Image (tube, rainbow, N blue to C red):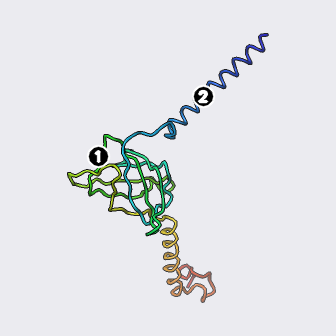
């Protein structure tokens, strides 16, 4: 009888722990409901790895989330719909950019507020945008450029002609 009671207590503790974890996961993911607020959109040439659920930030402070990313069938650009907290008003001349938290971090939508006294209304569009920067492409160009620079300087090394290792001409003995 005592063994059965300890099994029941252990089972209840597992169920309570799983429910607590589920509650935490739902509140952190935003799946428990929307924050309210109003929806805006912006059009980008490329959204890169930006995804639905990515944060929207001003000065590093989260003020909303990305709701939807869709393709404009006419211009073939990406339209990003996002929700902003109701207490935050965005000036009409603001700009939006897709930025990375770090080299390996997730992307987010950054809004730089303009100076206009006129605020965007729900459903409004931020016109000035900057698309995501493709880090892999930039690194590839840098490596290729560095390889070309290093390859161009090999002609001045005399180590291989003097019987030494290629590229070590300055180390060969006289």
Query: Label 1, on which residue?
Result: 89
Q: How many marks?
A: 2
Q: In the rendered image, which residue does mark 2 sit on?
A: 19
Point out the residue furthest to the left here.
117
Residue 75 drawn at (x, y percent): 43, 69
Instruction: Locate residue 77: give its quadrant.
Output: bottom left
Image x and y of residue 70, in percent: 48, 59
**Direction bottom: furthest residue:** 161
Counting from the top left corner in percent of width and height, residue 6 is at 73, 15
Give the mark toward the camera: 1 or 2: 1
Q: Residue at x 60, y 28 (%)?
A: 19
Q: Is residue 162 left or right of residue 2?
A: left
**Nearest the camera: 149 or 18?**
18
Question: 10 Å neighbourhood of mark 1: few (<14), some, or many (≥20)?
Answer: some
Q: Locate residue 161, reporting x and y percent.
A: 60, 89
Camera-side residue of 24 and 150: 24
Residue depicted at x 36% and y 62%: 129
71 above or below 5? Answer: below
């Amino acid at each position: 009888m005592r063994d059965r009671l300890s099994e029941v207590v252990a089972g209840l503790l597992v169920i309570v722990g799983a429910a607590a974890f589920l509650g935490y996961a739902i509140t952190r993911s935003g799946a428990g409901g929307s924050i309210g607020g109003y929806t805006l959109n912006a059009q980008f040439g490329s959204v890169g790895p930006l995804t639905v659920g990515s944060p929207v930030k001003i000065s590093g402070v989260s003020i909303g989330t990305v709701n939807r990313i869709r393709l404009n069938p006419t211009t073939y650009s990406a339209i990003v719909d996002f929700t902003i907290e109701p207490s935050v008003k965005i000036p009409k001349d603001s700009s939006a950019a897709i930025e990375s938290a770090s080299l390996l971090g997730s992307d987010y939508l950054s809004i730089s507020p303009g100076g206009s006294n006129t605020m965007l209304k729900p459903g409004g569009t931020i016109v000035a945008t900057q698309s995501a920067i493709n880090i892999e492409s930039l690194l590839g160009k840098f490596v290729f450029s560095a390889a070309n620079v290093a390859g161009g300087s090999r002609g001045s090394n005399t180590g291989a002609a003097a019987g030494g290792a290629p590229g070590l001409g300055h180390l060969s003995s006289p």
